[in-house]
Image (cartoon, grey):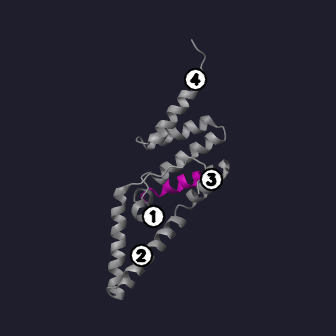
Amino acid sequence: MSSGKPIVRQISWLSLFPQLLVAALLVTGCCLLIGPSVLAVWTAMAVYLILSFTLKQTIPRSHRRGMAFLKSGDYARAAAEFEKSYAFFTRHSWIDRARFLTLLSSSRVSYTEMALLNLAFCCTQTGDGAGAKRYYEKALEQFPDSEMAKTALKMIDSVENSRLPAP
């Protein structure tokens, strides 16, 4: 079901290979414990799904809460959660850098970058254009290839320039 909010998901296809390796290791482990059988494969896949679900529910907890608030239109509470998410992933940057293994996530965009972009979006929705610009600039400072931040800053600049009196 669509939330009606501009949510972008970018997949890093290369990150699927380490995840397939994790799945293969689980299958191998289950085959060694149970013996080579269909039951071992199903058990390994069940363990993988449980592990994936658990990691994604527990570690990026603030990010998930922020997304829920964002989808419901509660931008102030969403921003507070994205601030927590940004702080967590800044403190534990190794989790975010290795998210393809630590969270079994295929996201091309890091949680740190997502937090900054979502904070900027929340600012735009609450009418805080200066705050939005500050977060997009911070995102671009930390992630120079962030096309979302570049595009948003161009849009902000074009709006600001259209308000200037004609010469």
Membership of 89 in magenta stretch: yes
Q: Dots 2 and 4: beta carbons under 8 Å?
A: no
Classified by dominant secondary structure, the portion drawn in magenta counts as helix
- Which residue is labeled 4 in the image? 162
Write the residue at 37% across / 66% down. 19
Q: The N terminus lies in which quarter of the figure? A: bottom right
**Quick one: label 3 or label 2, which is nearer the N terminus?**
2
Q: CA distance from mark 1 to mark 3?
A: 22 Å
Which three-letter amino acid code belongs to the residue tagged 2? Met
Q: Is the C-beta separation of discs 1 and 4 under 8 Å?
A: no
Q: Which mark is residue 71?
A: 3
First reached walking from the N terminus: tag 2 or tag 4: 2
The residue that label 2 is drawn on is 45
Residue 15 among those drawn in magenta:
no
The Cα–Cα distance between marks 3 and 4, rounded to whole angstroms, is 30 Å
Instruction: Give amino acid for label 4.
Output: Ser
**Closer to the camera, 157 or 2?**
2
Q: Amino acid at mark 3?
A: Lys
* Relative height, residue 58 to residue 75 (above, below): below
Q: CA distance from mark 2 to mark 4?
A: 55 Å
Q: Count residues near mark 3 (Cα–Cα under 10 Å), then give few for <14, some for 14-19, many for 20+.
A: some
Q: Nearer the viewer, residue 71 or 4?
A: 4
Seen as rendered, the residue at the extreme front is 1
Q: Residues within 10 Å of mark 1 (few under 14, many from 20)?
A: many
Identity of the amino acid at label 1? Leu
CA distance for labels 1 and 4: 43 Å
Q: Which residues are magenta?
A: 80-94
Which residue is labeled 1 in the image? 103
Q: Residue at x 44, y 57 (%)?
A: 96
The answer to whether residue 7 is above or below residue 105 is above
Q: Please report whichever mark, 1 or 3, sits nearer to the chain's N-terminal start.
A: 3
Q: Are marks 3 and 2 in contact (CB under 8 Å)?
A: no
